[in-house]
Image (tube, rainbow, N blue to C red):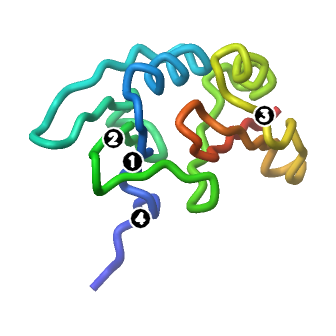
Amino acid sequence: MQQEKNNVVGWFEIPVNEMPRAIRFYNAVFGYEMESQQFGEEEMAWFPWSDTGMGASGSLVKHETLYKPSADGTIVYFSSPSGDLSQELAKVETAGGKVLQPKTLITEEIGYMALILDTEGNRVALHSRQ
């Protein structure tokens, strides 16, 4: 059986405590237009996606017992919409987040990364080639 050549990650979910606050943060930092929808006990807001692009998309998700924000677990890396993560990084604190690690060169081939804490207490990362 031949293995498909897909990216490893198919979807991600970022836990939130207060959906409107989380949406404001991600919209402000990345320029997204996210809205929430209720699905039973879960409230979700989807990040933009493309069926033709590389990578995976995901959502913010709120559930009283199944999802808890954390700064200690898995890290989701967001690709910089501007192409230079310095631009998004400059918006983090104004949007209510915190910069944990400034723009840092990984390698010339891979590019740069930074770590931030969102308004919900989740540690996430930014990535860009420049």
> Could you say whether the residue bearing mark 3 is in a helix, strand or loop?
strand
CA separation in Å, label 1 and label 3: 21 Å
Please say if the residues under marks 2 and 3 sit with CB atoms less than 8 Å apart.
no
Q: Is residue 74 left or right of residue 32?
A: right
**Comes first in the chain, label 2 or label 4:** 4
**Comes first in the chain, label 1 or label 4:** 4
> Could you say whether the residue bearing mark 4 is in a helix, strand or loop?
loop
Q: Residue at x 71, y 38 (%)?
A: 116
What type is the residue that disc 2 sits on?
Val
CA separation in Å, label 1 and label 2: 6 Å
Residue 124, horizontal then vertical, whole percent: 62, 44
CA separation in Å, label 2 and label 3: 22 Å
Residue 68, horizontal then vertical, whole percent: 43, 52
CA separation in Å, label 1 and label 4: 23 Å
Residue extending furthest toward the left: 40
Residue 5: mark: 4
Q: Which residue is mark 3?
A: 99
Please say if the residues under marks 2 and 4 sit with CB atoms less than 8 Å apart.
no
What type is the residue that disc 1 sits on?
Glu
Task: Characterize the local packing of mark 1: few (<14), some (14-19) or many (20 or more) Cα atoms within 10 angstroms.
Answer: some
Residue 43, horizontal then vertical, whole percent: 24, 35
Q: Nearer the viewer, residue 44 or 119?
A: 119
Residue 61: mark: 2
**Comes first in the chain, label 3 or label 4:** 4
